[in-house]
Amino acid sequence: MQAGIKLITVLVFPLCGGLLAACAGIGWEDSSFTHGGKVSGNLPALARCTVDKLQSDSRWMIRSLQYQVFSYPDIAATEIYAYPEGALAGTYMRNSPSNPDAVIRYGLPTPIIHPGSDADKEVDRDYSFVLTLKRTDNATAFATVSGRKYESRIAWDTLEDCSAPE
């Protein structure tokens, strides 16, 4: 009887480990998403509305995103980088979205102003998505979003909601 239990014990652990390893590779695929199009509205209003709506979203993964904004007045463009919680430099317990006692600054962060499009900027590659808005005329802008599929799709849908109807 003891030999049968030992045999089962010896077989169960490797089988469970193999099953766990096989399941780990299935399903969770962090694919990317890129989309672009014309939206109505001015850059500051679109950026502010989009970030405000994303910060008040009911999904915790979206609500906990933190933002870094780059403004390029020379070419009338704005870039909004969204980072998962803790990935943005300067995040501490006192301002972390997961801390219920934190002092969190909602809304669009103060843009970092750079002259020209290829300015020397510090961007962490661990961003969830980057939303780029470039003014085409006084009433419209061309927007692109690229990054992780889930967050980027939600950001694009939110931007379209903020865009004034044409």
Image (spheres, rainbow, N blue to C red):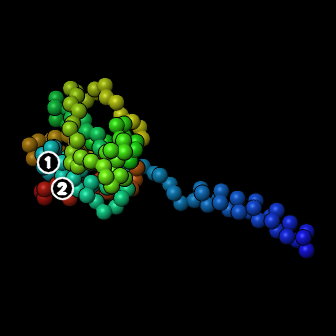
Residue at 16% over, 35% down: 76
Q: Please tell me in which quadrant of the rendered image residue 77 appears.
A: top left
Q: What residue is rendered at 14% in x and 48% in y?
A: 45
Secondary element at tag 2:
helix
x then y, percent, for residue 5? 85, 70
Q: Foreground: 126 or 158?
A: 126
Could you say which is closer to the camera, residue 126 or residue 131? Answer: 126
Count of numbered tags: 2
Residue 1 in the image: x percent, y percent? 91, 74
Question: Circle 2 is placed at which residue position?
Answer: 162
Task: Judge from the rendering whether residue 3 lies leftward or rightward of residue 17; answer left or right.
Answer: right
Check disc 1 and report its element: helix, strand or loop.
helix
Image marks 2 and 1: residues in contact by CB distance under 8 Å: yes
Q: Residue at x 21, y 30 (%)?
A: 113
Q: Nearer the viewer, residue 32 or 109?
A: 109
Query: Quadrant location of the C terminus?
Result: bottom left
Q: Residues within 10 Å of mark 1 (few under 14, many from 20)?
A: few
Q: Amino acid at mark 2?
A: Cys
> Please, what is the three-letter code of the amino acid marked with disc 1?
Ala
Q: Residue at x 23, y 49 (%)?
A: 106
Q: Which residue is mark 1?
A: 45
Residue 107 visible, this orientation: yes
Q: Classify 136 as above or below 59.
A: above
